[in-house]
């Protein structure tokens, strides 16, 4: 009897090789490899149109985009102020704040979507607070209206880490249009990828120009440097991958949503297994399918995680540990009251999800979960 194949938590969508190669041939003909090349320009315009946003600035990766977004808004002029953010995120979120000489202040998340709890945000504001940086966790929109009201009331910048939120719409509107800036990741694990890459969504021509100056060493023209910038540019090869993939995004979303639906149907009656149901007015991108294993399940989250691995099924405990438990943040994190974030972190497993995941593999995964 042959051994069943391994099922990994994700696989990147790869467009037909001949379509990608057609763009690569253009690069060879143009001999323009980076620095705002033709494909780079095409992808920025195509993404702005597809996402329904005013301006897109492409970057080499999402982390440099996050660093640059903070530089672009410069919420406290590098005076060492505080930015309120979530502990239930990837470590790039607080790292970007530290690199910008601001202090991350972690507050708890709400239970339903694992996003920043607006009430906890407002309670944490002090005279040192200069900005709020929420994360649309798993692509589920934050409470944008409440967070914007808090930011407006206290005169704070609002910068969204939207690494998971490509293509998500709320009441027909892109959630990338909220806040001062939104930052995307196009890493290979994301729903839309350019191998590595990222972007900042901005809302005015002046801000886009400022961001584009920052990502190109501060150059404006050939002989003028207007500010101390960085090299954050996306190459033409990465832009080619984005252009080749973008035409398939509607199909990708449809496949991902059908897989999520299958999971929900199969796991609906399993006691002790919770999952997130998208809001009624939200068009989800089905970026992840996290399940939360509570005390009603026969074994702990970690034991289920190990059982899945023994059956060749590789989920991911995402996010675990909390970033506030990592060494750079642990001393401060131990003083914080983060009960919901800690509970969610101890319960979560993101199950395998990618467009080409066969539904029979979803059945196999759910069978293991049910049979314990």
Image (spheres, rainbow, N blue to C red):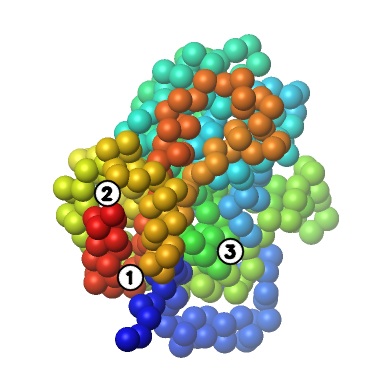
**Residue 196: image tag:** 3
**Residue 213: image tag:** none
Q: Are marks 3 and 2 in contact (CB under 8 Å)?
A: no
* Chain-order first, disc 3 or disc 2: 3
At a point 44% along the width and 48% down the height, the residue shown is 302
Q: Position of residue 206 (x, y in %)?
A: 59, 41
* Chain-order first, disc 3 or disc 1: 3
For this rendering, which residue is in front, 61 or 176? 61
User: Which residue in the protein does label 2 denote?
Assistant: 283
Q: Is residue 368 above or below residue 37?
A: above
User: Which residue in the protein does label 1 denote?
Assistant: 357
Specify the quadrant of the image occupied by residue 96: top right
Look at the numbered disc 1 and give the secondary structure of its residue: loop
Instruction: Please indicate whether residue 305 sits to the left or right of residue 70 in the image.
Output: left
Q: Position of residue 342 (x, y in %)?
A: 48, 32
Q: Position of residue 198 (x, y in %)?
A: 56, 56
Whole-angstrom CA distance, mark 2 to mark 1, is 21 Å
Whole-angstrom CA distance, mark 3 to mark 2, is 25 Å
Q: Position of residue 166 (x, y in %)?
A: 41, 53
For this rendering, which residue is in front, 97 or 295? 295
For this rendering, which residue is in front, 277 or 57? 277
Q: Residues within 10 Å of mark 3 (few under 14, many from 20)?
A: many
Q: Is residue 110 above or below residue 348?
A: above
Q: Is residue 278 visible?
A: no
Q: Residues within 10 Å of mark 1 (few under 14, many from 20)?
A: some
């Amino acid at each position: 009897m042959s051994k069943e194949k391994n099922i990994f938590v994700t696989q990147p969508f790869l467009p037909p090789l001949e379509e990608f190669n057609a763009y690569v041939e253009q690069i060879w003909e143009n001999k323009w490899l980076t620095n705002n090349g033709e494909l780079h320009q095409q992808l920025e315009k195509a993404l702005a149109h597809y996402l329904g946003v005013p301006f897109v600035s492409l970057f080499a990766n999402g982390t440099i985009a996050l660093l640059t977004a903070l530089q672009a808004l410069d919420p406290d002029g590098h005076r060492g102020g505080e930015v309120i953010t979530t502990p239930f995120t990837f470590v790039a979120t607080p790292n970007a704040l530290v690199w910008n000489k601001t202090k991350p202040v972690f507050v708890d998340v709400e239970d339903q979507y694992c996003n920043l709890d607006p009430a906890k945000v407002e309670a944490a504001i002090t005279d040192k607070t200069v900005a709020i940086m929420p994360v649309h966790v798993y692509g589920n929109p934050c409470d944008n209206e409440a967070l914007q009201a808090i930011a407006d009331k206290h005169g704070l910048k609002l910068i969204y880490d939207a690494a998971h939120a490509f293509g998500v719409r709320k009441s027909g509107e892109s959630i990338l249009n909220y806040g001062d800036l939104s930052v995307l990741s196009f890493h290979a694990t994301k729903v839309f990828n350019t191998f590595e890459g990222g972007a900042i969504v901005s809302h005015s021509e002046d801000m886009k120009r400022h961001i584009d100056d920052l990502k190109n060493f501060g150059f404006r023209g050939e002989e003028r440097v207007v500010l101390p910038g960085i090299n954050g540019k996306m190459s033409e090869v990465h832009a080619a991958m984005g252009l080749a993939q973008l035409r398939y995004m509607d199909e990708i979303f449809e496949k991902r949503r059908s897989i999520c639906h299958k999971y929900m149907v199969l796991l609906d009656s399993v006691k002790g297994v919770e999952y997130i149901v998208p809001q009624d007015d939200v068009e989800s991108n089905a970026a992840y399918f996290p399940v939360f294993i509570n005390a009603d399940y026969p074994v702990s989250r970690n034991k289920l995680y190990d059982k899945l691995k023994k059956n060749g099924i590789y989920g991911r405990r995402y996010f675990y540990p909390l970033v506030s438990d990592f060494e750079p943040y642990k001393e401060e994190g131990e003083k914080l009251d983060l009960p919901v974030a800690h509970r969610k972190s101890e319960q979560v497993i993101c199950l395998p999800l990618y467009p080409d995941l066969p539904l029979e593999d979803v059945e196999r995964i759910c069978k293991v979960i049910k049979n314990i």
